[in-house]
Image (tube, helix red, strand yellow):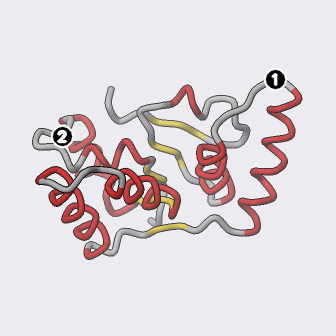
């Protein structure tokens, strides 16, 4: 069995905490071999780290990001198919008066075009996108 889940930023960043949520850990232990993330998630984590002042927290998070990369966690790109899906969904949602964040739209597009379940704590941010399945491993 290949990749089944696309992990959002809040799932991966949970692993950087001293005491990660036990439900997230249990799900990652169970499904970890079937998980990927999006290049945009790596950007969000790295951007957040870069904005921090120098100190212990920033240093620890930089090590965490390096460990993610050493683990060779599969990172999926925002490709042409995702761009087409995203444009279509932005137009559809805008016509309904909905304006989700651009990055959330990109992540949703990667999930939809790769037929993956999007795992996030923020299911409300993604619920209006079509053709995606959502799971919240925090509950």
Disc 1/disc 2 C-alpha distance (Å): 36 Å
The crowd level at tag 2 (other Cα within 10 Å; few <14, some 14-19, many 20+) is few
Q: Is residue 121 above or below residue 44?
A: above
Q: Quadrant of residue 110?
A: bottom right
Q: Is residue 30 above or below residue 96?
A: below
Name the disc covering residue 20, or none: 2
The crowd level at tag 1 (other Cα within 10 Å; few <14, some 14-19, many 20+) is few
| Residue 133 in picture, x, y percent from top left | 58, 39
Q: Nearer the viewer, residue 60 or 71?
A: 60
| Residue 42 in picture, x, y percent from top left | 43, 61
Q: How many marks?
A: 2
From the viewer's perspective, is 43 left or right of 110?
left
Please name the residue shown 44% across and 38% down the image: 120
Please name the residue shown 31% across and 72% down the image: 69
Q: Nearer the viewer, residue 104 or 2?
A: 104
Q: Is residue 57 above or below residue 83?
A: above
Please name the residue shown 63% across and 64% down the image: 78
Please name the residue shown 81% across and 50% down the image: 87
Numbered disc 1: secondary structure: loop
Q: Quadrant of residue 98?
A: top right
Q: Earlier in the sequence, mark 1 or mark 2?
A: 2
Quadrant holding the C terminus: top left
Residue on which disc 1 sits: 97
């Amino acid at each position: 069995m290949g990749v089944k889940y696309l992990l959002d930023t809040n799932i991966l960043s949970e692993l950087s905490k001293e005491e990660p949520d036990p439900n997230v850990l249990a799900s990652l232990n169970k499904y970890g071999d079937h998980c990927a993330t999006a290049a945009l998630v790596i950007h969000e984590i790295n951007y957040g780290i870069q904005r921090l002042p120098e100190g212990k927290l920033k240093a620890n998070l930089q090590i965490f990001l390096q460990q993610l990369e050493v683990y060779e966690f599969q990172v999926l790109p925002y490709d042409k198919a995702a761009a087409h899906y995203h444009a279509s969904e932005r137009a559809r949602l805008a016509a309904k008066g909905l304006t989700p964040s651009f990055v959330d739209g990109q992540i949703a597009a990667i999930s939809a075009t790769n037929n993956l379940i999007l795992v996030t704590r923020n299911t409300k941010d993604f619920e209006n996108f079509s053709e995606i399945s959502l799971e919240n491993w925090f509950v």
